Amino acid sequence: MNKLSLFTLIVTREAGERWHAFLNKEGLTTLFSFPCLGTAGRGLLEKLGLQSNDKTLFLAAAPHRKVKSLLRDCISDMGLNMAGTGIAMAIPFESAGGQSSLSTLLGGQEFDPSEVNKMDFSVYPYSLVVAIAEKGHVDDVMEAARSAGAGGGTVVHAKGTAAEEARKFIGVSLAAEKEMVLILLRQETRRAVMRAIMDQAGVHTPAHTILFSLPVEDIAGLKSVMQQEA
């Protein structure tokens, strides 16, 4: 089955531009990058020959059939298996927020959108909805989400690298500065919340929100979400 995955890569900050070029060459033209900080102690850094904990997180959508060859190329072409280089992983998509979001996320990669809906995620009681909007439009996204029953969300500042690619697929120019909103939901609430965001703050609104969801097996410590089970 031609499933869709969220390719996730964490590498050293100084290697970020080199990885960006590599991922573009591999066909991942729609990328989101986040400056972040590793947790390794000074002793471990010295053993690995690293100077700092500064990292860059890359997120990109890729057809599942492509992930194995992509991971293989990360090792053979970029030496990802060497100590201190980084880590890559693939997380299955649960759903995408409409054809516009899907086309923009894939950036020209071949994929049958009907395959997303064929995947059975009914065994997962929760969903993590990921909404990536233009900077300054978080309130638009959250007002839409709350109108469909969502509680709150977590905002992460990001940088998009696909402004020119986006113009090919949705006909608009996207700003580089992004805000990513993470909203944890009960499975039965997900569709309504995603639909509300698509309608009120979607790709064809000033927020230009790209939207998808990821399966979550279990949670702890989020009372507002867990109370929905009662």
Image (cartoon, rainbow, N blue to C red):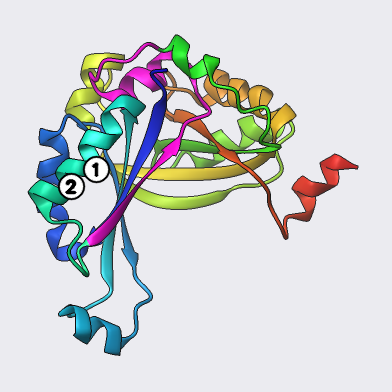
Q: Residue at x 34, y 84 (%)?
A: 41
**Residue 138 appears in view:** yes
Q: Looking at this rendering, what residue extends furthest in the right direction?
A: 230
Q: Which residue is mark 1?
A: 71
Regarding residue 161, the answer to whether it shows in the image is: no
The numbered disc on residue 201 is: none
Q: Is residue 225 left or right of residue 72?
A: right
- Side (left or right) of 220 relative to 84: right
Q: Residue at x 39, y 32 (%)?
A: 5
Q: Seen in the image, is 90 located left or right of residue 129? A: left
User: Vertically, is 196 above or below 150?
Assistant: above
Question: In the rendered view, would you say 40 is above or below 173?
Answer: below
Write the start and end of the magenta stretch as one range.
86-112
Residue 208 location (% of width, % of height): 40, 27
Circle 2 SS class: helix
Q: Position of residue 201 (x, y in %)?
A: 51, 26
| Residue, far bottom | 43
Gap between marks 1 and 2, in whole Å?
5 Å
| Residue position for label 2 | 74
Q: The N terminus is located in which quarter?
A: top left
For label 1, the SS is: helix
Q: Quadrant of residue 62?
A: top left
Q: What amino acid is found at the position of numbered circle 2 in the picture?
A: Cys
Specify few, some or many for label 2: CA neighbours under 10 Å numbering under 14, 14-19, or 20 or more: many
Q: Amino acid at mark 1?
A: Leu
Asked if the magenta segment contains residue 104, the reply would be yes
Q: Is residue 230 magenta?
A: no
Disc 1 + disc 2, Cβ < 8 Å: yes
Q: Residue at the location (60% across, 47% down)?
A: 153
